[in-house]
Amino acid sequence: MRGFGPGLTARNLLPLRFAPRPPRPPGPLLSSRPAAGASSLTRAMDDLLRRAVPPTPAYELREKTPAPAEGQCADFVSFYGGLTEAAQRAELLGRLAQGFGVDHGQVAEQSAGVLQLREQPREAAVLLQAEDRLRYALVPRYRGLFHHISKLDGGVRFLVRLRADLLEAQALKLVEGPHVREMNGVLKSMLSEWFSSGFLNLERVTWHSPCEVLQKISESEAVHPIKNWMDMKQRVGPYRRCYFFSHCSTPGEPLVILYVALTSDISNNIQAIVKEQPPSETEERSRITTAIFYSISLTQQGLQGVELGTFLIKRVLRELQKEFPHLGAFSSLSPIPGFTKWLLGLLGSQTKEHGRNELFTESECKEITEVVGGPIHETLKVLLSNSEWAQSEKLVRVLRAPLMRLCAWYLYGEKHRGYALNPVANFHLQNGAVMWRLNWMGDSSPRGLTSSCGLMANYRYYPEETGPNSTTYLGSKSIRASEQVLSLVAQFQKNSKL
């Protein structure tokens, strides 16, 4: 087998986040109306949409109106596939969202009818039918197009790619606005139904899996890049497991991938798991007491936000319990993307207010100053912006205590709408895991040092408690954490005035 070659590069972490796609030439933002003297392409788009998007039948005829001809949907797929520029695809999607959504007049009329019936004593059936009419009026027209495309051969895969383009267009600000956000939400909801757990197949990857599958798995690794075939062989060999979900319509096509290390304890260092070494030929089952989930990657950007990762961890956990009934511990070994960026922001704000220090104790300030030989905040902001600072043993030693408690607060205390700000923490906590341990120098690679100052986290999965923990976190936004994490948080609260 040949090596992977220079095309194999690192990608940004998920849960479920993705590497940015290669930038394309930016296009103009869409206005609510086409400009005067519209181009022939614009006119072609408008003509296509008028033909391809089925009109909404009257409520009374909703189940008697025949579906549009298959060719109309196929025309849309063919036309869209012929658009080579991101700006062109964005314009078509913007026109679809803007002009073929909900009929707001119908919604207002049906809403008024429901309100009127609620004020009068009526039979329940009358009110329920009025509510059903309102519900029908709230369905955007483009949903019908998506529904009929899904019935075409390869239609669902096309819609996944279409949503990936839509997300990219929004990120590049090629198209924006409430109508586009609404259409993205509708499409995400439809994909969530089509990719629910009942339609997903769990498949295990081994060294004897088809070469095409191994290649796709290696290229999709978003957390710890795979270097060569020997590295790949180790990650699917003894003391390792690799699983992925495929859809029933595309068996063998990885959608989300999970790597597992089978160990004798809860790992605190990723290099010990992914280091290059000849793989063992056999497993000693008696040495396996712990399963470490150390990488999970989504391969299709269009499925962002669909709960594939959550389903996969739960299925793999059950699979491992069947294979190793004596397993006593399940844990992740997770990166902490965003911590360095957050910390640099804090250091910058402290720098602007001269003489202000709310991050370090007096003794820490003295020790750090002796090592760096300059103003703490300005100097650390420069040092922590790259990975070279870890080459100084003295700096690594004096930064350990303050960075550990700052990271604990970042994971436990920093929130977005009441939930953990860090996306990886939020993902595992939603799954019902416990924020169990922070690991100093858990990832000493350049990538780990620059993204999270070398820190990694263990999120512990207790199978009997994941359900209640998930309910508590999602309901009351309360985070379950170990004594180590809570102790570090308490230290932060005592020493900082943020």
Image (spheres, rainbow, N blue to C red):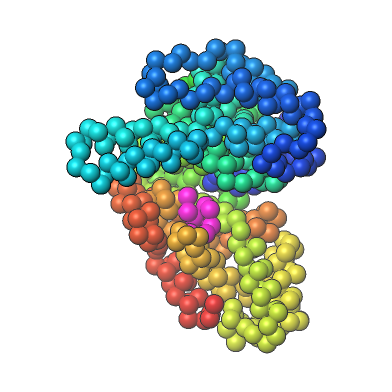
Task: State the residue at coordinates (27%, 35%).
Answer: 128
The number of numbered discs placed on residues in the rendered structure image is: 0
- Is there any visible trace of residue 343 in the rendered image? yes
- 451 or 165, which lies in front? 165
Q: Where residue 119 sits: x, y (%)? A: 25, 47
- 38 or 29, which lies in front? 38
Magenta stretch contains residue 287: no
- 321 or 50, which lies in front? 50
- Is there any visible trace of residue 300 in the rendered image? no
Task: State the residue at coordinates (79%, 29%).
Answer: 39
Task: State the residue at coordinates (70%, 79%).
Answer: 351
Q: Where residue 151 sits: x, y (%)? A: 51, 18
**Region in magenta:** 420-427
The vertical placement of 92 against 350, above or below, is: above
- 418 or 115, which lies in front? 115
Q: Where residue 199 sits: x, y (%)? A: 43, 26
- Quadrant where the image shows the C terminus: bottom right
Task: State the residue at coordinates (76%, 42%).
Answer: 28
The vertical placement of 326 against 209, above or below, is: below
The vertical placement of 370 against 287, above or below, is: below
In the picture, measured across the screen, residue 11 lies left or right of residue 474, that is right
- Quadrant where the image shows the N terminus: top right
The vertical placement of 75 against 361, above or below, is: above
Q: Quadrant of residue 124?
A: top left
Q: Quadrant of residue 96?
A: top right
Q: Main secondary structure of the magenta part?
A: helix
